[in-house]
Structures are given as C-alpha cells and as structure tokens.
Amino acid sequence: MMFLKLAWLNIWRNGRRTMITVASVFFAVLLAITFRSITDGVYENMIHNVVSYSSGYLQIHKNGYWGEQSIDNSFEVDEELSKSLLDNSNVTNLMPRLETFALSSFADKTKGVMVLGIDPVSEKEVNQLNEKVIEGIYFESNSTDQILIGSGLAEQLNAKVNDTLVLIGQGYHASSAAGKFNIAGILKLGSPELNSNVIYMPLKASQYLHGAGNRLTSLSIMLGKTSDLESSKKAIENSIDTVAYEVMTWKQMMPEMDQFIEADSSGHYIVIGILYIIISFGLFGTLLMMTFERNREFGILIAIGMKKHLLAYVVLLESIMISLMGCLMGVLGGTLIVHLFTEYPVEFGGTLREVYEDYGIEPIIYFSGNIRIFIYQTLVVLVLASLLALYPGYKVLRIKPVDAINS
C-alpha cells in the first residue's frame, strides 16, 4: 500500500508529463476501439442484411434440398418442429419461407427473379421489412394478389406501385405456376444484390400459386448470440430428426461471403498490427522521456539508500497507473464515439457509394457495440503499455548513482 501511495504521488509531481503519457495511452485505446468497431460493424451489418432477408443464421430444410433446390424437395409445416426449436434459449425467431424462382414480366421487360413466400408478421418483427418500404404499403398476411419488389428490380423493369406484374414459374410436382400480382410496395434492402432480384409475397399466396398446400422449402432461424453459431447448430441437430431434416449455417450456405469476410479481415489484421506498432512506439517515446527526465532523481534516491529493485517496482507501478488511467479514458471516449455513430451511421454518396454497391455491400458504415471489442482492444493496449513499462525499471536497475547525479 505504501508503494502504491508513493507511486500515485510521484506521477502528479510533474502533471504535464503524466498527462502527455496518459494522452498517448488514451488515443491508442480510442484508435484501436474505433477501428475494430468499424470493421466488425460493417461485417455484422453485411451478414445481418443478407441472412435476415434470405437464409437466416441457421436454416432447416428437407434432406437433399440444398443439393437440388426445387419446390419438390419442400416439407410440410410441423408445429412440433417449431416448438422444439423455440425451446432453444438462443433461438429468437423462426421465419417460414417458400423459396422459388420465376420469370417476372412487365410491359416489354422480363427478368428472372427469386420469389420468397414469407410470413409478413414474423418478417416485420425480425428485420422490420415494413420499414424498408420506400414507396407504397406493406402487405398483410391474408393478401392474395399483392407483392413487394426490390427497388433495383423495379428500376430494371421500369415498374411502379400499383402496376401489375406477371409471374411464370413451376409449381409443386411440375404443376404450372402463373399469376398476375399487384405491386403493393417497393423495398430498399440492405443488400444491393437482393434489391435487384427479389420479390416478396405472403406465404399463403405463394403456397396457393405453386400448388404447395401447407409446404415450406425452409425454416430460417434467427439467433440471439451469433457468435454461438456452431454450438446452436449442434443443439438443434440433437433436438430434431436429422434423417428427415438438414441444418445448415449461413457460412455453409454462403461460403463466398464467408471467404470474402475472412480475406478482408486478414488485411484489417495487418492494418491493426501496424496500428499497434505505431501505438507501441508512441508509448515507448513518452516512457523514455519520463525516464531520462528523472535520471538525476533516481541517482539521488539510490545514493541515499533506496534499493534499486524497490525503486524499479515503484516506477513500474507509476507506469501501470498511468496506463490504466489512459485505458479507462480511452474506453469512455470509444463508448461515446461508438454510441454516436451507432445512432447516426455514416452513409456514403457519389462514386464511393457505387463502388460499395458493385461489391454487394450496403454503402453505410455501421459501428459494432460488441463488448468484446472494448475488452480485447483495452487489454492489448494495457499489455503493451505494461511490457513497455518494464524498460524504465530495467534502466533503474542498471543506473550508476554518481553518473546519474552528475547528468
């Protein structure tokens, strides 16, 4: 306790020097948290945008469906299956879907599209699909002739709200699936690729159009903790009939997106590694300045009888205290910045927007508020600061009192 008090008093004997060192640690933590929050936020938003509107974090479908994605490989709605899934504490929502492909036509324009039969209520709860409607209205569950289309598709077909779209496809057991539908609303989704290729219709209407009775092609599962993807998959496999059903993660269903994130993350790890090196040199510079400024002081203390190892211990405590203050201030500053940009995300415009959309990424920078970012980045900077703080202690152990006093 005595050494703690002595170290605390020492760091405030020269307040300006202490504040310079604290500021170095503060900006180091702030930069590390901000950078990691941006990269993780972009990935999390990209994954959520794609999986919530299409596959889900996990998906259950009939065995063999993924190899041959045909409506003939659909399955009957099973209430017992849904109940057993919702018994899993990490499962937050289930989204029943009937996914097919069709040829859409308006006036003299045609385009192949993905037709998603959805439950309007569950989609509204999970991904706020109703809030994505930029023109027109959101349809109801009992609607039989209304559809929602992506803004990219509307632009390609030159179609507007209340126009009639013709869909021609194949129904269950090779039956004919053709109908005319009124465009109730136009959506702007987070994924530009989906925006240009998707049509939503109420599940009952889709089942009727395709002669599919009470059948689904998949049951999409949303999770509370997305980090528990594999463990959630295993838990679900243990609770269902794996002979009849297959469980897949979004990584298995969309390996190209997973590979893109992995490849992009590698570049970010290099950047953050360089950032840590810069941070280390900045901290080392301030600690070096602090050590040389106090060289004469250390020499006098040793000359009057203070043991070198005790003095080195006090100097180490001073450095750790300064680092802790900087880390706490950095976490506070990082929290404020992340909260601000979580509420008001940065949206790109112009050429940069087009570049992002060409890669199928929503042109918005989201910040991740995951607590692990704050913990990991703070710990890394704290460990770096603590390791660098060993240098002043080493210099004290090697000091020669006479030379230090005369310096």
Image (cartoon, grey):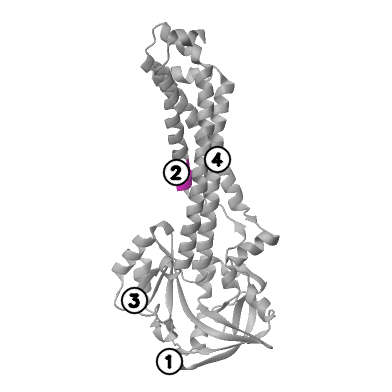
The earlier-in-sequence mark between 2 and 3 is 3
Q: Name the amino acid, label 4.
A: Leu
Q: Height in image: 10 above or below 273?
A: above
Find the distance from the CA under tag 1 to the CA under tag 2: 54 Å
Q: Look at 42% across and 19% down and name the residue there.
A: 314
Find the distance from the CA under tag 1 to the CA under tag 4: 59 Å
| Secondary structure under the numbered disc 3 in the rendered image | strand
Q: Position of residue 323 (x, y in %)?
A: 48, 30
Between circles 4 and 3, the one closer to the viewer is 4
Query: Which one is in front, 130 or 336?
Result: 336
Q: Position of residue 303 (x, y in %)?
A: 42, 7
Q: Quadrant of residue 247?
A: bottom left
Q: Name the amino acid, label 1.
A: His
The earlier-in-sequence mark between 1 and 4 is 4
The earlier-in-sequence mark between 2 and 4 is 4
Find the distance from the CA under tag 2 to the CA under tag 4: 12 Å
Magenta span contains residue 347: no
Q: Which residues are magenta?
A: 372-377
Q: Name the amino acid, label 3.
A: Tyr
Between circles 1 and 4, the one closer to the viewer is 4
Q: Is residue 374 visible?
A: yes
In the picture, the disc for residue 245 is 3
Q: Look at 61% across and 62% down and name the residue there.
A: 356
The earlier-in-sequence mark between 3 and 1 is 1
Q: Which residue is mark 2?
A: 376
Q: Are marks 2 and 4 in contact (CB under 8 Å)?
A: no
Q: Name the amino acid, label 2.
A: Tyr
Q: Position of residue 178 (x, y in %)?
A: 55, 91
In the picture, the disc for residue 30 is 4
Q: Which residue is mark 1?
A: 173
In this image, 217 relative to 200: left or right?
left
The earlier-in-sequence mark between 4 and 3 is 4
